[in-house]
Amino acid sequence: MRHLFLLLTLPWLAALALASDTTPGTSTNDAASLAPFHVQYRLYVSKIPTTIKADLWLRQHGDAPDEYQMELQVKSLLVSNSEISTFQWDGCEPRTSFYQHRFRGFGKRRNYDMQFSWSPPQVVTESGDEHWTVPIEEDTLDDLTLLLKARCTFATGDKEFRATSAYGKRLREHHMQVIGTETLDTPIGKLDCLIVEKKRDSDSERRTLFWVAPSLNYMLVRAKHIENRALFGELILREYDGPMPDQPTVAQHQEKQAAD
C-alpha cells in the first residue's frame, strides 16, 4: 500500500495536470501564461476505493506576471503529504526558485526545503540539521514542475520526453513515451486521451501509465501503477475546476506526428 501511494502521488505525476491559456496554433516557444486551477484525484488499490484523495492547485504568485506556485496536498488517516513549488514560467521553460516537501506516514518522515539558484546553477537542500549543495544543469526541474515541459513536448506531436529533476541530494532521470490512445468517461464528460508510459529497465515487471487529455492541455485524467498481476493502484480524476480551452485533440496530435 505504501509503495503504491508513493508512486501514484509523487509530484512528477501530478505535474501532468498543468493547463495553460495557449490557443490552437500557438508555438510551444511562445511565452504563454498559465491559468489557475484546482483538481482532485482519488486513489484506488486493485479497483477498491481508498480514503486517500490528492488535491492539486496552480496559482499566480507574487507581483511578477510570470511567477506561479503549485501545491499538492494529500491527507488521510494513513498519510499527510504537502508539496509546494514556486517557479517562473517563460513559455515552455519553467525555472524553480523554491521547492518544499513534507511527508508523514507509514513510519516515514521527509522534510525538505530546496533553494534553487542559477548563477551558478545549484540546489541547496535543508532537512533538519542537515544540508546539501548539489550542482545542476540549466534545465533541471523540481519534482512538481517536471512535466510542464512534457506537456509542451506532447503538444508538438512528439512521442517521447526526457528530463532531469532534483530531489534532496539526488538528480533523477525521467523518460516518458506515448504508447496509445483511449477515450475515458470523466466528471466533465468523455475525453480522448493519450496513454503515456514511464519507461523502466527492460527487465522490470512494474509499469506506470498516465492518461492525459489534449483537449484539456494534457490534463492528467487517470494514472495506473502495476506492481504485479495481483496488485495495482489507480489515481482517477474526480473534481476539476479550471479553464477548458480549445486545444488539439488526439487526432490532431497524431496528424502532427505523421507530418513530422
Image (spheres, helix red, strand yellow):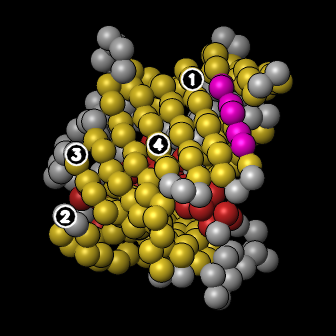
In three-dimensional space, the C-alpha distance between marks 1 and 3, rounded to whole angstroms, equals 24 Å
Mark closest to the chain's N terminus, 1 or 3: 1
Q: Residue placed at 58% from the left, 29% from the top?
A: 99
At label 2, the amino acid type is Ile
> Could you tell me residue 83's position as x and y percent?
54, 38
Q: Which mark is residue 188?
A: 2
Label 2 crowd (10 A; few <14 / some 14-19 / many >=20): few
Q: Residue placed at 56% from the left, 47% from the top?
A: 80
Q: Which mark is residue 72?
A: 4
Q: Nearer the viewer, mark 4 or mark 1?
A: 4
At label 4, the amino acid type is Leu
Quarter that holds the C terminus = bottom left
Tell me which secondary structure the magenta stretch mostly adopts. Answer: strand
Mark closest to the chain's N terminus, 3 or 2: 2
Identify the secondary structure beneath mark 2.
Answer: loop
Quarter that holds the N terminus = bottom right
The residues colored magenta run: 109-114
Mark closest to the chain's N terminus, 2 or 1: 1
- Give the labeled residue for mark 3: 242
Residue 98 or residue 31, whichever sits in front: 98
> Could you tell me residue 200's position as x and y percent?
70, 66
- Give the labeled residue for mark 1: 98
Dots 2 and 1: beta carbons under 8 Å? no
Q: Which mark is residue 201?
A: none
In three-dimensional space, the C-alpha distance between marks 4 and 1, rounded to whole angstroms, equals 14 Å
Mark closest to the chain's N terminus, 4 or 1: 4
In three-dimensional space, the C-alpha distance between marks 2 and 1, rounded to whole angstroms, equals 33 Å
